[in-house]
Amino acid sequence: MINWTIILSIARTHLLTKIKQTAIAALGVTFGIGAYITLVCFMTGLNKMLDDLILNQTPHVHIYNEIEPSKKQPIALYDEFKNSFNVVHSIRPKLTQKKIHNALPIIDYLERNDNVRGALPQIKTQIFYISGSIDIGGNLTGISPLDEAKFFNMSDYIVEGSAQDLHNTDNGILLGIGIAEKMSLDIGDRIQVSPISGEVFSLKIVGFYQSGIADLDAIQSFTNVKTVQRILGEAENYITDINVKLHDISQAVSMSKEIEQKFKLKAIDINTANAQFETGTTIRNLITYAVSITLLIVAGFGIYNILNMLIYEKMNDIAILKATGFSGKDVQLIFMSQAIIIGVVGGILGLLMGLGLSLLIDRLPFATEALPTIKTYPINHNPWFYFIGIVFALISTFFAGFLPSRRAKKIDPVTIIRGQ
């Protein structure tokens, strides 16, 4: 029967008599786990921030009427050319409306789907911003401000004012920060906008929008759906786009195909709209986890080397233990216990070190025009990372101690004593 009290007592004595080597081994685990926690928390936090910058503003399914050439040309209507190979030059796009026919019933149909979190109407139109003698071409989008803030985190990109202010002001406008800077405008000022029809409408600035994309901020602004309908002289059912947010993003592709077949509209899923971005995200995550795993493996090899040297230095102790009645298995358990103790102590210190560095980075100021609402460096405090760290510390120290201890188990004490 194994006497764990004696085995742990001997293991503790070995560790304390070689306190310098014990400390170095524990610090190897500490720095390895600490570096892993810090790196993976920071890199995944950064990746999530970059993902959100694009994906927060991208609907899972975008529905609209696409302007495209007619697939069937007039010449195909003549029977005499039915079996001929026809070549048609200078094909023009077919006459189609930007308006989505029966948009409100379609929105109602989508919102009854259990996988749909929200289906938001939009109206997109080209306008001119007029301030004194200055005319700037741009885009005006009619939205439901509170729904946009709820489903697409629009509030994260409003640097002054709020979505509530826009919702409460019928003739309000959320102006792109680039336009405001060009025209030296401030909240409460009025700006005149003119659609292609040529009429001029005065709107009150209730806030500034900054997406982080300078070219977009120089032309884009938002107002209420009803305000754009009034500017364009259209009815309340005039909708040009529908943005759909799903509970399960993996269903976006199948839903977009279903919508196209059912309503004969163009429906772009988020995967298609951001194919290149998704590739970049995958590569960044792969690099993050590859470097993190490398750090853990290097720490494991450091522990192995130190324990291996410790056993060579303890040859006399091994001989004495075996000569006094300890079995080879007892000797192996003594050195395995030392490895596990080093792993536990070093792993816990590593977790504390990683947590401390992560909290420090999380408080460092980080200011960039591309991300106006981000004030500090992003950190992802996922408990799963800490669990992986302590488990790897225990596993790595177990195997780092198992191989040298197995050698100690097989040592013949007579051979050692004769060598002395």
Image (cartoon, rainbow, N blue to C red):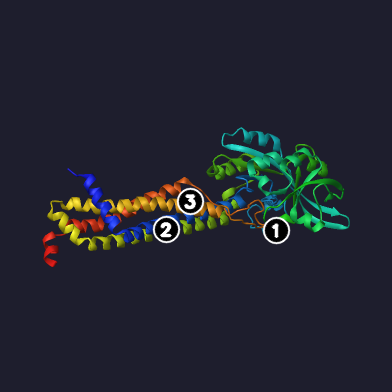
Q: Nearer the viewer, mark 2 or mark 1?
A: 2
- Residue type, mark 2 in image: Phe
On residue 342, the disc is: none
> Residues at badges 1 and 3 in contact (C-beta under 8 Å)?
no
**Residue type marked 3:** Leu
Q: Which residue is mark 2?
A: 31
Find the distance from the CA under tag 1 to the CA under tag 3: 36 Å
Task: Report the side of 163 relative to 59 (left or right).
Answer: right
Q: Which mark is residue 214?
A: 1
Q: Nearer the viewer, residue 170 or 299?
A: 299
Which is more toward the observer, 52 or 272?
52
The percent position of residue 100, horizontal first and vertical second, equals 71, 42
Cα distance between the residues tagged 2 and 1:
41 Å
Position of residue 54 in the picture relative to residue 44 (left or right): right
| Mark 2 residue element | helix
Q: Residue at x 26, y 52 (%)?
A: 11
Whole-percent x, y for residue 228 in the image? 79, 43
Residue at 64% from the left image edge and 58% from the top image edge? 85
Q: Nearer the viewer, residue 80 or 39?
A: 39
- Cα separation, mark 2 vs mark 3, equals 12 Å
Residue 355 marker? 3
- Between disc 2 and disc 3, whose residue precedes? 2
Q: Is residue 244 above or below residue 321?
A: above
Residue 237 screen position, x and y as percent = 75, 37
- The answer to whether marks 2 and 1 mark residues whose Cβ atoms lie closer than 8 Å is no
Q: Position of residue 146 (x, y in %)?
A: 69, 39
- In primary-sequence order, the first of circles 1 and 3 is 1
